[in-house]
Amino acid sequence: MVRIRYAKGPVVYLYDIDNLRTRKRQLLWGDWLRIVDDIDEKWSRVSWGGGTFAIKKEDYQQERLLEMIFLDVGQGDGCILTTPLIGTRERILIIDAGIGDNMKGYLEYRFRDFKNKFRFHAAVITHPDSDHYRGFQKVFENPQISFENVYHNGLMERTGPDLLGPLEGGFLTDIRPTESSARALYADPAVRGRKWYPELIWTALESECFGDIAMLSTEHGAKEDGRSWMPGFAPSDNPELTIEVLGPVVEKAPNGQPGLRALPATMSGTAMNTAKTKNGHSVLLRLQYRGFAILFGGDLNAPAEHFLMRHYGNSGAAPTTLTETRAMIERARASFGADLMKCCHHGSSDVTEEFLEATAPAGYVVSSGDEESHVHPRPDLLGLLGKKGRGERPLILSTELQRSTREHEDQSLRRKLDRLVEKIKREDDPAREQELKDQRNEILDELFKRNVGVYGSINLRTDGHRAVIAFRREKSSQTKRWFYYELEKDTDGVFQVK
């Protein structure tokens, strides 16, 4: 009887079925396996990747892991989160999708073009910056894909002089927390105009493939113990796996309405800066799986971090002494402390040391691209991360730095793929159609898996007690594919790089 099992870690090997001393494949902790039968008391026969191999029984486990892929989307963010639950309880979330087609391409590779349709638990659009949301457009347009939930930060871009809506008393109060309120705004084509963000949200609103479309914030989530959680991930749902919503922080404006405060260009400024405001109110998530915590920092900036530290640090008035500042940081650490952090704003140096001290992770993931004018990740920021991170050698992993090749795909292969897709649509012979589909899948593998799905992407696997952070070697063999780091708890119960 076929059994589904998972590779032990940090890496294990598959062996030649006819020569148990010959390694054939290297697997990362948590890789999915199909155990066919037992060879003897020490070995099992396994089906993997279209082949049949042998694996030591001591090298696989029954427990599934929490898995995150920080996809190489170029300049932008994109993360695929798969919960450790199995069967109908499995939940897959996409947190941002970059600006181009990399997310779409990788999903088509991973789920083989959604031949049988696929329903994701949630799409999280952290804020209306195109390098975070634009990649969702073609994903949302695919009729084979559906989402139970689409979450956003409540700020709806529109045409006209007030990009984020009118400003009243230093607050943006025209937030759109519900599906009906978003529809009421975007039902007018003149409001949508030709802007990308309204187009994306309207695509979701008009599609029959989506469940709820809602704002996610400190006031718009599952409220429990005075805190806000992503629906379905509150402590009462599963105390071992929670996702807390730390931002955007909704406040009461002077007119009594709920709103998001306008953020200035600098911490000493007063006038609203549109870019800083929409970035600073990113959907900010802290995932806790057993003893391991991950913070998703969105595109936070210094003014936003300054506000958040005082909000969560319960400092009231701004601290005036070093002792008061340290006390504020310690209080904020209860909310922001993490073992791994998705670094804010692609490695921008627009950060505060206070916030980094409150998070103090053992590892950082920076999502950035090659062909951009922002010089991300900034060299001074990398130095600061190393200084403020946990331990003697905190990890700083970057999708751009882990990949020396460009994120752009081979255009000749892309054109060949487009021709094959058109041929498949017209083909009536089932045998020929399958042959064309096999060719298509080979090209998808080459285009998406090898470039963005492999060489720049950063994989996290954890059982909540230890973690492995890995990326693929660009020059590798089948038996030497992964470069990895391990995080384990020290004698004080704190995760450190092993």
Image: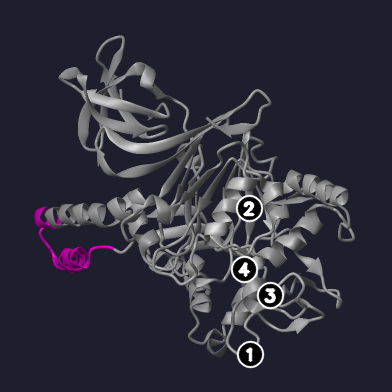
* Numbered disc in front, either 2 or 3: 3
Q: Residue at x 85, y 53 (%)?
A: 314
Q: CA distance from mark 2 to mark 3?
A: 24 Å
Cα distance in 3D space between marks 2 and 1: 31 Å
Q: Which mark is residue 19?
A: none
Q: Which residue is mark 4?
A: 279
Query: Disc 2, disc 3: CB below 8 Å?
Result: no
> Which mark is first along the chain, 1 or 2?
1
Q: Residue 265 — which label? A: 3
Q: For the residue marked with disc 4, what is the amino acid? A: Asn
- Front label number (4 vs 2): 4
Which stretch did the figure color magenta? Answer: 409-433
Can you give x and y, in whole percent of width and height, for residue 334 in the image?
A: 75, 44
Answer left or right for 44 relative to 207. Answer: left
Residue where numbered disc 2 is placed: 285
Q: Secondary structure at mark 3?
A: loop
Look at mark 1 in the image and give the residue it sits on. 161
Q: Earlier in the sequence, mark 1 or mark 4?
A: 1
Q: Is residue 10 above or below residue 118?
A: above
Q: How is the image coloured?
A: one colour
